[in-house]
C-alpha cells in the first residue's frame, strides 16, 4: 500500500503530543475540543501525560468551508486555520471528521489513505453501503479509528448496564426509550444542513437516534425483529422528524423507541429511559446526567443524581466506569491500540437504522435484523 511521505501509522506517533487536526468547526467540533481540554489532554506546549494520566495532544489546525466559523474555532481552541482539508491532514497524526454526514466518507477515506488515525462523528454516512465502505477503508489502511457514540461513555448509562447484568435483576421484560430534541436547524445547533437531504441523508433517526439504537442493544442485548412508523411534520424533503419503533429482543422482552424533533424552545436534547425486568425497574433521565434510579423486588429505591454521585455509587458497587471518549482516542493513537467504539461497532447501529427505514417504508412491516 502506498502511503504519502510523512504519514503516521498507529504506534509510530512522534514523541510528545499527538497532533490533532479538525475537519469542520461547528457545534460538534467545539464539543470534542472542549472534551479534550476537560480531560486534560490539551495544554499549551506540554508533552507527555497530564498529572491525571491523560495523554497529551495539541491542535495543529482546522478547516471549514465557513471561514468565519473556522476562525472562531481556532481562536477559542488555540490553533490555526488551514487552507484545505489536505493541509490539515498533512500536519496531524489524527483527524476529527466533524462535517455534515454526506462528507464523512470522502474525508475519512482521504485521511485513511494518508495513514492518519480517524475519529468520525456519527452517523458514519447517509447509507449502510457507504458506512460499510468506510469501515473497510480504515481497516485496509490499518489506522486507528473511532466513532462518536459518546453515550457509551456516559457514567449513568454504564452504571445501568452493569446493574442490568446482575442476576438479581432477572430477565428483561420491556423497555421504553423516549428521545426528544428541538429541531436542530439554526438556533443553538446552527446546522441548517440538517434540513437538506443531500447533506444529512435523513432526519431524526439517522442524525440523532442512531445513538439510541446503539444504546438499546448495548444495554439490552441484540434486537431480533423491529417494526417502525415515521412522520414529517416540518416538511423538509426526506427529513423525518418523528419515528416510533417497536422491538423484540433475541433474549426475549420487548421495547419501544420514540424519537422526535419538535419546536419546543430550550429542549436541546432530552432522553428518558425506563426498563422493567423480572425483579426490578431501572430508569435514567436527562441523558442519564439528571438522575439514575433503580428498585428491586425488596422495594429498595436507589436514586443517583449527577455524574459525581454516579461515579461514587459505581465505586461502591465495584462497577468500573468508562473514561473520557476523546482521551481514549488520543491514547489509542499514541499507543497504537484499538479505539472503542470503532467503526465496526457503529455498523450494527447502521444496520438497525436501515431496517427501521425499510419497515417504515413498508407501512410498519416487521423486519428481522
Image (cartoon, rainbow, N blue to C red):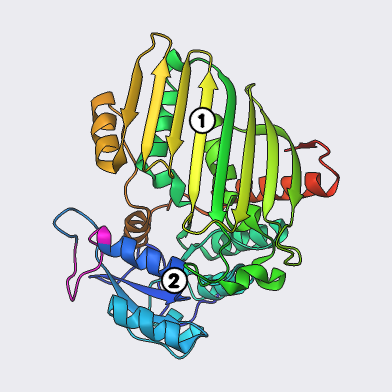
* Image: magenta residue range: 38-48
Residue at the image point whose x is 61% and y is 55% from the top: 261
Residue at the image point whose x is 32% and y is 75% from the top: 59
Q: Residue furthest bottom?
A: 83
Q: Quadrant of the N terminus?
A: bottom right
Residue 328, disc: none
Helix, strand or loop status at disc 1: strand
Task: Give me the C-alpha separation between circle 2 and circle 1.
Answer: 37 Å
215 sits to left or right of 52:
right
Residue at the image point whose x is 83% and y is 38% from the top: 365
Quadrant in the rendering for residue 50: bottom left
Residue on which the image places disc 2: 95
Q: Quadrant of the C terminus?
A: top right
Helix, strand or loop status at disc 2: strand
Give the overall secondary structure of the magenta segment: loop
Residue 347 drawn above or below residue 17: above
Residue on which the image places disc 1: 274
Q: Residues within 10 Å of mark 2 (few under 14, many from 20)?
A: many
Amino acid at each position: 500500500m502506498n502511503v504519502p511521505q510523512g504519514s503516521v501509522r498507529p504506534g509510530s506517533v512522534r514523541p510528545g503530543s499527538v497532533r490533532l487536526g479538525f475537519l469542520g468547526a461547528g457545534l460538534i467540533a467545539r464539543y470534542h475540543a472542549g472534551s479534550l481540554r476537560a480531560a486534560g489532554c490539551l495544554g499549551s506546549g506540554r508533552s507527555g501525560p497530564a498529572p491525571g494520566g491523560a495523554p497529551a495532544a495539541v491542535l495543529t489546525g482546522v478547516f471549514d468551508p465557513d471561514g468565519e466559523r473556522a476562525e472562531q474555532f481556532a481562536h477559542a481552541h488555540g490553533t490555526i486555520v488551514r487552507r484545505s482539508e489536505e493541509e490539515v491532514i498533512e500536519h496531524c497524526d489524527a483527524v476529527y471528521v466533524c462535517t455534515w454526514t454526506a462528507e464523512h466518507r470522502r474525508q475519512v477515506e482521504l485521511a485513511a489513505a494518508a495513514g492518519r488515525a480517524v475519529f468520525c462523528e456519527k452517523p458514519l454516512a447517509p447509507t449502510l453501503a457507504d458506512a460499510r465502505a468506510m469501515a473497510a477503508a480504515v481497516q485496509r489502511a490499518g489506522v486507528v479509528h473511532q466513532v462518536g457514540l459518546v453515550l457509551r461513555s456516559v457514567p449513568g448509562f454504564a452504571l445501568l448496564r452493569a446493574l442490568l447484568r446482575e442476576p438479581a435483576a432477572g430477565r428483561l421484560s420491556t423497555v421504553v426509550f423516549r428521545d426528544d430534541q428541538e429541531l436542530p436547524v439554526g438556533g443553538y445547533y446552527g446546522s441548517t444542513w440538517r434540513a437538506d437531504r443531500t447533506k444529512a441523508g435523513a432526519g431524526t433517526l439517522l442524525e440523532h437516534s442512531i445513538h439510541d439504537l446503539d444504546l438499546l442493544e448495548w444495554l439490552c442485548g441484540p434486537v431480533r425483529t423491529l417494526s417502525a412508523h415515521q412522520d414529517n411534520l416540518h416538511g423538509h424533503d426526506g427529513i423525518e422528524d418523528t419515528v416510533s419503533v417497536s422491538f423484540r429482543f433475541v433474549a426475549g422482552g420487548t421495547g419501544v423507541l420514540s424519537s422526535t424533533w419538535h419546536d419546543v424552545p430550550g429542549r436541546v436534547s432530552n432522553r428518558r429511559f425506563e426498563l422493567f425486568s423480572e425483579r426490578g425497574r431501572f430508569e435514567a433521565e436527562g441523558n442519564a446526567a439528571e438522575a439514575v434510579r433503580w428498585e428491586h423486588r425488596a422495594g429498595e429505591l436507589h436514586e443517583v443524581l449527577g455524574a459525581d454521585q454516579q461515579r461514587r455509587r459505581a465505586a461502591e458497587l465495584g462497577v468500573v466506569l468508562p473514561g473520557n471518549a476523546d482521551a481514549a482516542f488520543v491514547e489509542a493513537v499514541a499507543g497504537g491500540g484499538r479505539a472503542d467504539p470503532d467503526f465496526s461497532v457503529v455498523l450494527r447501529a447502521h444496520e438497525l437504522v436501515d431496517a427501521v427505514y425499510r419497515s417504515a417504508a413498508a407501512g410498519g412491516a416487521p423486519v428481522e435484523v
